[in-house]
Image (cartoon, helix red, strand yellow):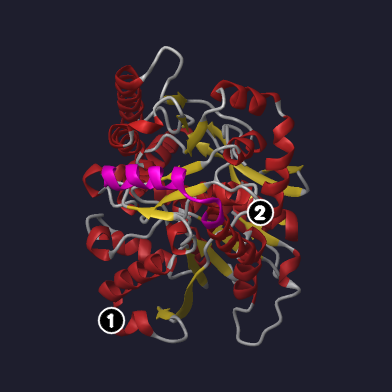
């Protein structure tokens, strides 16, 4: 787990839960750079998991991480095609880092290992391992959306990424829509017949199975945290600061895919259309800084500060501020306490692979007096959480009216919607997610027992 990480996201939380449940080796970046990368990974053990980490070359880090990963793949895969940047040098750095991971991981693998690679940073790792002779089952899970080929074709050498994914034995996506988009890319590359074979996709003599594995949350753990956090001084101060007012909450990384500027404008529309809520409702937006060294993220922060200041200046009273906007991290337990004490959760990304905050909001609620989730139809979670009030995040009036409807919703309807969504979360929690993926990966050959391979899963 990178030393520089200040808050664990959905990927880290989900993978750590899988590792703690099954054991194994977590291989990844140390969070540091070096002029010369040591030949041997750094080995540590934390939270019951063995970690093997490597530094990244100083010359490759910026073009790889800030460049190809976050200025090329991230905007493209979230359909911000106009914001995508590309350079041959950055793509070369991406390839070198994936090759470095393959070189350092291969000596650590045992014959009975499973290797489960995660997310867009390492799409070419499987091909690198195969080229070096790895014969272990290789799986890949994409945590972010996969774009339709009509968007993907804007990327030079997009074919390399698709071929790289086809080096894995199993490729998983968050939603059926993402799976269909990947099929569109395979069809464009290999022909329509290749993307519709019942046993998987065959390319260069290798069969790749593809499927949907929506990531879940630890429902029981979140409920424990949410209850326990009520004694936290931070949560008590939050409640005291509301002075009896109801709370509408948003919790997101500061990222343009989260639709935060649109959300502020929708809240302004809410205040315009439903003035009866003035001085009775406070909107709390928590948005920890993310990739603050990238220009686009600085612009988002400035836009939010300007919008929040303007809206507060327009509607505030001497004893009430409509929007509280915080650029800071809180512990996961405290956040669950904030969610539990908020009568409306607003999760309105303009594109998201899943969005675990939506699921955490539902899990954190008091089942006897639950809040209401307002959820973007463009978040992967919308395919499962149909009990939410589903909105188009660009439709400020629709979002505004959904917040009003949530605040006015009768208790019986709130409880029924919450109960249905909680049943879904329990049936597809984080444990079911990793168990299903690992079982499918371990059964690479039809009918082959996977029990021995579960003993030590290599997870990236």
Is 409 one of the magenta-colored residues?
Answer: yes
Residue drawn at x 70%, y 64% as measured from the top left: 110
Front position among marks 1 and 2: 2
Mark 1 residue crowding within 10 angstroms, few (<14) / some (14–19) / many (20+): some
233 relative to 167, above or below? above
**Magenta region: which residues?**
395-413
Q: Nearer the viewer, residue 405 or 354?
A: 405
Q: Residue 290 appears at what percent x and percent y?
A: 45, 33
Numbered label attached to residue 218: 2
Q: Nearer the viewer, residue 144 or 227?
A: 227
Residue 30 appears in the picture as rendered: no
In terms of image quadrants, where is residue 67?
Answer: top left
Q: Which residue is mark 1?
A: 192
Left or right of 212 in this view: 315:
left
Mark 1 and mark 2: Cα distance apart in space? 39 Å
Q: Nearer the viewer, residue 444 or 131?
A: 444
In terms of image quadrants, where is residue 43?
Answer: top right
337 relative to 199, above or below? above
Q: Residue 224 appears at what percent x and percent y?
A: 73, 46
Mark 2 residue crowding within 10 angstroms, few (<14) / some (14–19) / many (20+): many
Residue drawn at x 67%, y 37% as measured from the top left: 333
Q: Quadrant of the N terminus?
A: top right
Is 39 one of the magenta-colored residues?
Answer: no
């Amino acid at each position: 787990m990178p030393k520089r990480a200040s808050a664990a996201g959905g990927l880290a939380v989900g993978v750590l839960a899988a590792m703690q449940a099954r054991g194994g080796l977590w291989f990844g970046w140390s969070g540091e750079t070096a002029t010369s990368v040591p030949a041997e990974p750094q080995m540590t053990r934390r939270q019951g998991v063995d970690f093997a980490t490597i530094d990244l070359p100083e010359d490759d880090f910026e073009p790889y991480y800030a460049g190809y990963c976050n200025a090329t793949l991230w905007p493209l895969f979230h359909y911000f095609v106009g914001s995508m940047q590309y350079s041959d040098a950055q793509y070369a750095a991406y390839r070198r880092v994936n090759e470095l991971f393959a070189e350092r991981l291969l000596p650590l693998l045992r014959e009975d290992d499973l290797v489960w690679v995660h997310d867009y940073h390492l799409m070419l790792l499987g091909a690198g391992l195969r080229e070096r002779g790895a014969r272990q089952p290789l799986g890949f899970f994409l945590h972010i959306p996969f774009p339709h080929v009509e968007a993907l074709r804007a990327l030079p050498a997009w074919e390399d990424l698709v071929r790289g994914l086809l080096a894995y034995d199993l490729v998983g996506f968050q939603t059926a829509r993402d799976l269909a988009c990947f099929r569109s890319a395979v069809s464009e590359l290999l022909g329509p017949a290749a993307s519709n074979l019942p046993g998987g996709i065959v390319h260069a003599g290798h069969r790749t199975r593809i499927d949907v594995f929506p990531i879940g949350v630890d429902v029981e753990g979140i409920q424990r945290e949410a209850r326990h956090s009520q004694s936290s001084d931070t949560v008590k101060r939050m409640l005291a600061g509301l002075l009896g007012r109801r709370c509408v909450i948003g919790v997101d990384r500061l990222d343009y895919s989260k639709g935060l500027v649109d959300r502020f404008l929708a809240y302004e529309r809410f205040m315009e259309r439903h003035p009866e809520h003035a001085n009775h409702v406070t909107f709390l937006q928590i948005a920890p800084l993310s990739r603050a060294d990238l220009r686009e993220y600085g612009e988002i922060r400035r836009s939010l500060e300007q919008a929040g200041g303007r809206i507060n200046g327009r509607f505030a009273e001497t004893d009430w501020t409509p929007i509280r906007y915080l650029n800071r991290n809180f512990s996961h337990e405290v956040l669950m306490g904030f969610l539990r004490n908020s009568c409306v959760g607003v999760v309105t990304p303009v594109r998201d692979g899943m969005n675990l905050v939506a699921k955490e909001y539902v899990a954190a609620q008091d089942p006897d007096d639950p809040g209401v989730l307002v959820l973007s139809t463009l978040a992967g979670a919308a395919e499962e959480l149909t009990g939410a009030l589903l909105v188009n995040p660009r439709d400020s009036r629709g979002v505004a009216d959904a917040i009003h409807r949530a605040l006015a919703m009768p208790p019986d309807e709130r409880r029924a919607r919450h109960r249905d969504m909680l049943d879904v979360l329990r049936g597809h929690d984080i444990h079911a997610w990793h168990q299903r993926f690992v079982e499918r990966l371990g059964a690479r050959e039809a009918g082959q027992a996977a029990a021995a391979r579960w003993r030590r899963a290599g997870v990236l």
